[in-house]
Amino acid sequence: MKPAIVLATLAPILAALPAPAQQCRPVDDTTRAKVLAYAQGLYGNIAAAPLQIANAALDPATCIYALTFTTSPPAEPFRRQLFLSPDRRYLTTAVYDLHAPLGTRAAFLNRGFDAFLRQHHIPTLGATDAPVLVTVFGDYQCARCAALARMLRDELVPSLNQRVRVAFLNHPSSRHDWAQTAAQAAACAATQTDAAYWAIHNFLIENQDQLSAQNLAPGLDNFVPSIPGLDGDALRACIASEETKPEIEAESNLALASGVTARPTLFLNGYEWAGPATADQLRQAIANLPGQAKTRAGR
Amino acid sequence: MLRAALPILLLLGAAELSHACVQFDGAARARALAQAREILGLPLNTTLSISTEAVDPNTCWIQLNLYASTPGTTLRRVLFLSPDRAFLTSTVYDTQASPPGPILIVPATDSGFLPVPPAPRPPATVDAALMAYATPAEMSIRNGSASVFAQLAVGAVAPGSNLHPAAAISIGPPVCDPPSIRLVSTSAYTSRPMPVSPVGLSHLVEFKIRTAPDNATPGVVRVTVHAYSYPPVEEGGCLRLIRGSERIVTIRVRPQ
């Protein structure tokens, strides 16, 4: 009988029976010795002592074993994890379940961004409870960053009303000679009021092509008196003392940890968008995000 | 009785199935691509396709040569699909093969279905270094639970070349002081290679910590993070040995 026919004949019967517990093939002594010898061959040149299987954790749903190989003290610590296939023949360095839920990385990143914004009191544009968080990594000396910031402020946020919240985080390039100082100045303003932060932010992106390392400080000095409620002396002292430098470093580190390789890079609820974007493209991408009803996001 | 007979019937079927690999059909292909996009952390506006694929007729593993294209950049990666079509992985070792080393069904840039054994090359040692970024020095526990993010980066550079093997981290068992503090879980997400020196991968790691709800004692959780590296399969499947490093990440916990 052909296998397909056997299975087809049995399918209704199988469906009617309670699902039996999955019987995973055990790792017997022979398999254990074979796997250990194989790992020894793989890692023997770098492990300072014979390997042992320190831990073998079975996932009953897949019958995959996670094996942890280590050396014993006093040898230099060595630790590797490999996964043993259900048929106990293959070792792999990772197991990515084809049926795992999608979007976990984006959700994870977005939770990280949201937590960072709250922990560091970063002002955001748009509704604070908006369902879509747009996180932008850039620097104030990058022309495409300024163009993107203007588009987000003037087109995307107004068109999506309460649906979107935008955060600008700094990832200053070492090739830009005033981006770091500008970022620190904006962060200094944020320690006073959100409005002061946005005033400095807008000043920097609107006047980017006029600014330089030489005229940034006098330019800010001329502009600051026009910002209601901003203590200019306190701002100058904050900039001079570089007290917000660690803040900008934390933002840069978040960019690195999130895999940012270019400026600007933006994330829509944790999903990265690479390269230039128009408002229409972003509206479409937002409408297609998981959990975003197209009719609502697009209006 | 029927249940007792089932394994025999299935075994009879399996005997005939032994040389027939599970199909990699349209639905499975779509799922594999969606998961590959997730695994590789590709941007929304990146197109991802399977440029070539090859089935090893003896083992039924499928090598997927993936091609991703974003405005201005392209990316090639290799993933392997298990014989049961249930999971993807980046490197496969066949314990029946000798000498030990990752299998490669076809070169990543070629097409075809003939198994090509990896070219034997002398092993090289690759250093992996771990740099901690912005690990929070202290965290507050509210109502007995907290979650904290640490940003870690791993770098690895192959000696004598500008090729950089993939680098990764594993997180060892935590040491909690006092023991009433528990590290419930850690989640690590690997990002794309960074153009920093040394070239490496970045990881965002979330630590979830619990204490008794009325905990009033500050404490410390120490977690050993190991860095290790392995070669990309594109390098020809040769075995490059790895030297890892480790760093202890300390998280101070204080009740709020």
Image: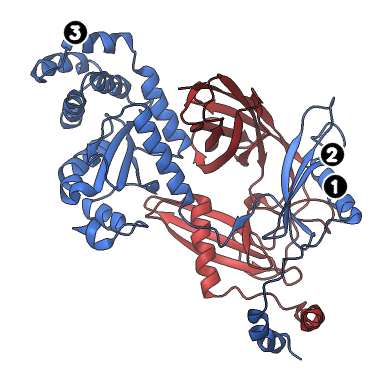
For label 1, the residue is A36
Location of the C terminus of chain A by quadrant is bottom left
Above or below, A223 against A251 in this view is: above
Marks 2 and 1 in Cβ contact (< 8 Å) = yes
Query: Which amino acid type is shown beneath numbered disc 3?
Result: Asp
Task: Please tell me which residue lies in front, A185 or A108.
Answer: A108
- Does residue A264 appear in the picture of this structure? no
Which chain is drawn using blue? A
Other-residue count near label 3 (Cα within 10 Å), few / some / many at <14 / 14–19 / ≥20? few
Above or below, B159 against A236 in this view is: below
For label 2, the residue is A51
Gap in angstroms between the C-alphas marked 3 and 1: 68 Å
Q: Residue furthest bottom?
A: A1
Query: Which amino acid type is shown beneath numbered disc 2?
Result: Leu
Rendering quarter of residue B45: bottom left
Are labels 3 and 1 on one chain?
yes
- Disc marking residue B73: none
Residue under mark 1: which chain is it in?
A: A
